[in-house]
Image: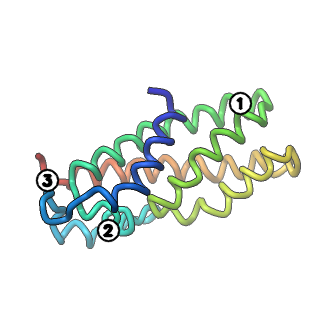
Amino acid sequence: MHFIDNLCILSILFYILPYILNPNSKKQINESMNSTQYKYIDLQSIKDDTFGDVEILRMIIELFIEGIDEYVEILNNELANKNWHELFKATHKIKPNISMFGITKLVPTILELESNFRNEKNLDVVDAHVSFSIPIFREAKIELQTELNLMPNE
C-alpha cells in the first residue's frame, strides 16, 4: 500500500476507534507499558483512544513506522527536485500523525514546512527544517519499534 494511503487509513482509524472498540472485550496493554517514557514520542493519548487494544495499537504503530521511511524519502527526493506540491501533500498527510504519536518537537516544524510548501514561500528555511526533522523521525521510529517490542504477543 502506498504511504499516503496508509496515512489516510491511520488517521481515520485513530478518530473512529473510540466509537467502535469495546474496552471490556479486547486485550489490554498492561499498566507497566503506560509508564514507558521516551524522548520523542508520547503514546498515552493513542493508548487511551484505542482503549489499550494491543492489536489495534500494534497495527497503527506499524503503519506509521512504514510511513516514516517513505516520508523521509519523499523529503529527500522531492526537495532536491523542488517539487513543492508533492512535498506539501506528503507533509499535509503526515501532520495529524505527528500529533497522534505525540511527537511534539516536530509539530511547529511540520506546520511551518506545510505552509512553506503550500505557499511556495520562505523556501530559504526549508532545508534547515528538513535537516532538523529527519533525525527526529528516525529516533521516533526507533522508539516506536521499541514500543512494539514491549507489547505482549497475541
Q: Check the image and report above or below for 39 versus 146.
A: below
Crowd around label 2: few <14 · some 14–19 · many ≥20 (10 Å): few
Scheme of colours in the image? rainbow
Q: Quadrant of residue 53?
A: bottom left
Q: Residues within 10 Å of mark 3 (few under 14, many from 20)?
A: few
Identify the residue under disc 3: 152
Q: CA distance from mark 2 to mark 1?
A: 36 Å
Q: Earlier in the sequence, mark 3 or mark 2?
A: 2
Estimate how packed mark 1 is, as few (under 14), some (14 to 19) or many (20 or more) residues with alpha carbons within 10 Å.
Answer: some
Inter-mark Cα distance, 3 to 1:
39 Å
Pick whichever, 79 or 60, lies toward us.
60
Q: Earlier in the sequence, mark 2 or mark 1?
A: 2
Q: Name the secondary structure under disc 3.
A: loop
User: How far, Cα to Cα, is label 3 from label 2?
Assistant: 17 Å
* Residue for point 71% across, 30% down: 78
Task: Give how far across and how far down residue 150 sits, in percent.
Answer: 20, 55
Q: Up-down: is 110 above or below 134?
A: below
Residue 90, position as x, y percentages in the image: 63, 39
Quarter occupied by the N terminus: top left
